[in-house]
Amino acid sequence: MRRRPFARVAPSYGRRGRLSYVGAAAIALALAIVAPTVVAEGQQPAPPRPPPPATRAPAGTIELRLEPEAPLVAGGRGTLRLVMRVVPAAGWLPADEAPWIATAIADGNALEVVRPRQTRLDALDPAAADPVLRFPVVARAAGDAVVRVTASTFVCRVRARARRCRAVTSTSRTTVAVSAAGRAP
């Protein structure tokens, strides 16, 4: 049996007179390119499709309020208190026992968030409609630190025994002051 080095690359007929799969693929590709451009006589080309809708209407937002529980002093430890409240859009309701997740990230060197990601189970009262989370922090240096908080949960719409839920995410930025050691603001 003779070996043909380009047998799989170039279209050729096999031993039984059938075109190889590479040749068939090349013909299919050529037809796919040419077929849409050919329009029969008397026919109009298909109208262009309308653009897809930009975005869905938001199902709601989350109000975030972040504040230190006590004044922060450089070299010390403290706690940031985050209060979250869902504000659903018309027709949507906050989901009962829906998972909550919140992430706090401090920009700069003045503050470090020790445990940046928390869930509903970490809240002071996990069954509360508006959970309150406490983020432990370490004040490294005096100055202002920008803390970004992102929170996510779900809101649901109930129609005819069908429940449809959507994720809701909000982000907030807060400036937290860290005073020099020995002085509290």
Image (spheres, rainbow, N blue to C red):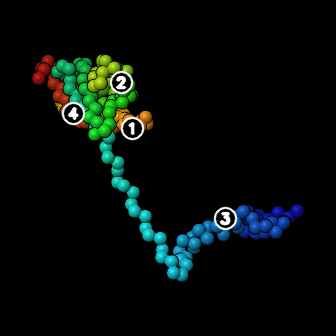
The nearer-to-camera label among 3 and 1 is 1
Q: Are marks 3 and 1 in contact (CB under 8 Å)?
A: no
Q: Which type of secondary structure does the marked residue at label 4 adopt? A: strand
Decide which of tag 3 and tag 1 comes sooner along the chain.
3
Secondary structure found at label 1 = strand
Q: Which residue is mark 3?
A: 25
Element at label 3: helix
Q: Cβ–Cβ below 8 Å for labels 4 and 3?
A: no
Q: What residue sits right under mark 4 in the picture?
A: 174
Q: Amino acid at mark 4?
A: Thr
Quadrant location, the C terminus: top left
- Pick the front one: 76 or 44: 44
The CA span between labels 4 and 1 is 38 Å
Residue to which mark 1 is pinned: 159
State the image quarter where residue 40 is shown. Answer: bottom right
Q: Earlier in the sequence, mark 4 or mark 3?
A: 3
